[in-house]
Image (tube, rainbow, N blue to C red):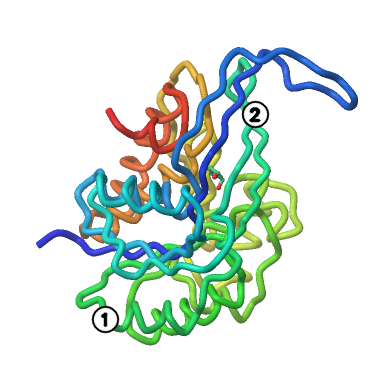
Amino acid sequence: MKPKICVIGSSNIDQFSYVDDIPGDGETVFGNSYETGFGGKGANQAIMAGLLGAETIMITCLGSDIFAESTIENYKANGVNVDFVQRVDGSSGVAPIWVDSTGQNRIIVIPGANNLIDSDKAITSIEQIDDLSVLVGQCEIPMEVNQAVFEYARSQDITTIFNPAPAQKLEKDFLEHVDWLIPNENEFEVISGLEINDENLIEFKNQITCELIVTLGEKGAALISNDAVAYFEAPKVDAIDTTGAGDAFIGAFAFGLASSKSVDESIKIAIEKASLSVTKKGTQSSYIN
Ligand code: RIB
């Protein structure tokens, strides 16, 4: 039987501008190319988990625009279950993204329908999914919805993974419903209020009840226990576009856990998939080998 993963979160249409140098205040520059693609942190994580072989169910909220239909088609084309996709009147989420010649990005998310996802409907959806192993969430939908859904999932013994992106402070009450917290370096500093170093990673780990992994970009990832930090290195690659690499990590890690792989093995698969994704342009388009 395939491992079953549900992702609750955002769907966006990504609008990429590739440029040598990101313009400064008041500056106009010529870009090199423009592309659109399917994105949203939740959507990207679901697509990656599905590509690796999980049965993946997406709970997201789309608008009444042309983007909504194409997003549904994209989920279907990638084998992601859309039975529980919610719809509202108005715009779907969009994300203008600037990527410079080093592959680094700047992203603005305009959530649209993502902000209107309904928590009662989401919980009813999860109730209908038999044998769900893992639930994944992020911060691109309202935190009240994550709070209600994670609390319900935890009460059903579903393993929960939370990727606190974009970075924001999290309530202690919410973290009690999380099994795995996976921020990047910047998100770690926002959540913990601490600079990133071994001592502070361990200090924060001792303040929370869940497991903690911090992703470190080209340096790989760190698994933090109550008295040590274990580092996992990433392979050296030529980065063209780092957009969505963090989401590739989360989706692949969720797949590993849901497939009963060890934590170390799940982290290694996640790093491999995230590293590979930065060698290609786009978000979901960079996951397809
Ligand atoms: O993590 C990358 C994603 O962030 C993009 O796909 C964009 O839509 C934003 O959600």
Q: Considering the image in quadrants, where does the N terminus appear?
A: bottom left
Q: Nearer the viewer, residue 282 or 101?
A: 282
Looking at the rendered structure, the kind of residue marked 1 is: Gln
Q: Is mark 2 within 8 Å of ligand 1?
A: no
Using the numbered discs, state the Cα–Cα distance from disc 2 to disc 1 in whole angstroms.
39 Å
The mark total stands at 2
Q: Name, please, the residue furthest toward the right.
A: 26
Q: Can I make out residue 212 in this image?
A: no
Mark 1, other Cα within 10 Å: few <14 / some 14–19 / many ≥20 = few
Q: Can I make out residue 266 in this image?
A: yes
User: With 274 as the anchor, is 115 left or right in this view?
Assistant: right
Q: Secondary structure at mark 1?
A: loop
Of the numbered discs in the image, which one, if any, rests on residue 98? 2
**N-term mark: 2 or 1:** 2
Give how far across and how far down residue 51 sits, in percent. Answer: 25, 44
Q: Nearer the viewer, residue 180 or 197?
A: 180
Of the numbered discs in the image, which one, if any, rests on residue 46? none
